[in-house]
Image: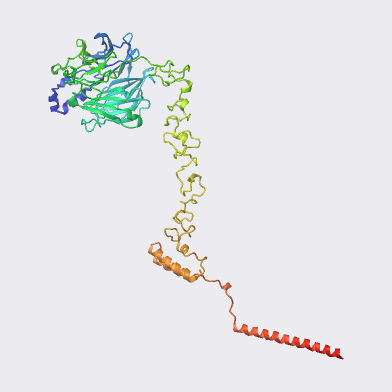
Amino acid sequence: MINLKMLMDKILLSTAYMKRHNLLINAALAFLCSFVILPNVASADLIAAKAGEYRGAATNLVIIDTATAAVVADIELSTTAPPAFYGSQLWVNDTIYVSNKCDIYEVDATTYSLTRTIVVPDGLCKANRDLDDLAFDASTNRLLVSHRTIGQVGTPLVAIDLATGAASALAFPPWINPTAMAVRPGTRQAFVVTWRDGIWVVDIDTGLTIEHFGHGVGGQTSTNGTDQIHGGTDLEFADANTLIAQGYGVVKFDVSPIDSGLPPETLWFSTDGDGGWGYDTMVTSDGKIFQPGWMRSRVRNSDGTILTGTGLESVNYYYGSAAQAPDGVFAVSSGDLAHSGSIGRGVVRLYNDADFTLQGTIDLSASYDFILLRGTPSNPAVAVADADGDGIADEADLCPDTAAGDAVDANGCSDAQLDTDSDGVINNADMCPGTVAGDAVDTNGCSDPQVDADGDGFCDVGGSSGGPSNCTGVDICMGFDDNEDVDGDGIPNGCDDDDNDGPLGDTDADGVNNQTDQCVGTTDGAAIDAAGCSIDDICGGCDASNNHGLYVSCIAHTSKQFEKADLISRIERQQIKRAAAKSDCGKKSKKSKKPKKSKKSKKSEKSEKSEKSEKSKKSEKSKKSKKSKKSKKSKK
């Protein structure tokens, strides 16, 4: 699709560029409309297009049968709203949705009649904004709508509830000039390409940005496509992992790395010079890529090499684009630049995508100024699949593996498959039921608070999973951080009754931990060396010394070493030495010394001995005398 004002900006940026392409300003102001393939189309031969008259007030939907090259329906949508320069069509079952300005028209595809008009309110859509690409979210019965803007920042993706018609903002990323959208098949990812700001990937459910890549830098076109897609106008998915982005050149990306948190990989890049600048791409049923362009068009193989000899490269599809019907026929249109080789305004040509031969021409110029086709995912429509046979199509089945015979709800889920706590993991696989709404969970349905309540990285006792942060081990101190163990005794601080008894503690508070402290119990305030020892500790202490001289000498020597190490000052050393010298450390106690005998005492001892001796002599004499007397009496 084309943004008119952005086209004018490009033209006015360089006079040389304008001369080279022989552009006309009035051509840039021409009216443009849009074609889109119809997924789930009832007839495999039909393509729909929004049409109108430049500066007119009518907006119509034209249905073309590619098998007969004929218009089968021309439905008037509005007589008052001029058709926007942009817009898309999307066929959902038997309903066609058409975007135009701030309106979404709903058309019954069986009766070809307008059934309602959904108006997107101001704030989500303004006068200088046009609703553009459409996608259907079957799981929530919503339309997703992107904007085309000029110089607008923060333009939202819009979600429309088809049951009520209510519109709401899905996402407000800080993108600039969004120009096209595509939903990655089989995922909940919406890709949005911008004019100058690369490609954004948004989560359809949360509206949060998943990835941003292919950034435009300084308004310049990359020469290798590795870091930007500038002038982005269209996105197409060749398959679930392959994205084709159109801008000033075409880039092919492998987007599968996004699933593991990595940016997409650029597979190949074509520059403007080798394909002609265009606004659209189309992926054929066999994987080839068609680029309608001005001055020439290109058909590329899946590896990016140009396929020549198709006849299409010689035709200028100015402002042209293409859309493919599931029967293998694709339609191509162009703008009104007949003088430069254009096929003419309002003309649609049909080609066979197998050999690119012309199948027919439809001239709508009598009714409309001209038609612009815009390609969307062009894989053929497939029959509705229901792999588990529960009556809900796989496309809308949130539980695709329901057991045979189980009753299911509108989403295709049985009671055993429901996700009661809405954490994205069904009950059967949810190891942590009752997750708080909004909390992130791991593949087992467990949030961090459910398996690691105190958030210290150690799993709670009985924890059934690791949570998004992948906790490990077992939490030995619930409610506290197990990583905090100040004394290194293996008991976290929160559960340790003594934070100083471990090897990393400091029992004596001397600044040296127990593991390296060679003198645990140092006196408070004493100067210590690197081993945690004071001067007194090194000298054995006063109480343990038994030699005063040795003690004083040790104190003197050790204090000198402390002074040299700047652990004490000179004055402090002198004070320590003086105190040691005056102390009784190492001296013997006075009570333990034997008293000296005085001369006086010696004489006293001699006197006592002499007296004892004389008494003894007198006693012996007395005894002898008595014996003698007895003896004499006896003789008588």
Residue 345 placement (x, y as % from top left): 18, 14
Residue 224 placement (x, y as % from top left): 22, 31
Residue 631 quadrant: bottom right
Task: Give the residue displayed 42% in from the left and 34% down from the top.
Answer: 468
Q: Is residue 508 left or right of residue 187?
A: right
Q: Is residue 27 left or right of residue 181?
A: left
Is any atom of residue 34 visible in this view? no
The one of 145 and 188 positioned closer to us in this rendering: 188
In the rendered view, would you say 595 is above or below 205? Answer: below
The one of 216 and 558 positioned closer to us in this rendering: 558
Task: Give the residue displayed 43% in from the left and 21% down from the top.
Answer: 401
In the rendered view, would you say 458 is above or below 542? Answer: above
Tally the numbered discs: 0
The one of 48 and 403 positioned closer to us in this rendering: 403
Of all residues, the one furthest to the front in this rendering is 635
Residue 195 placement (x, y as % from top left): 24, 27
Q: How is the image coloured?
A: rainbow
Residue 629 quadrant: bottom right
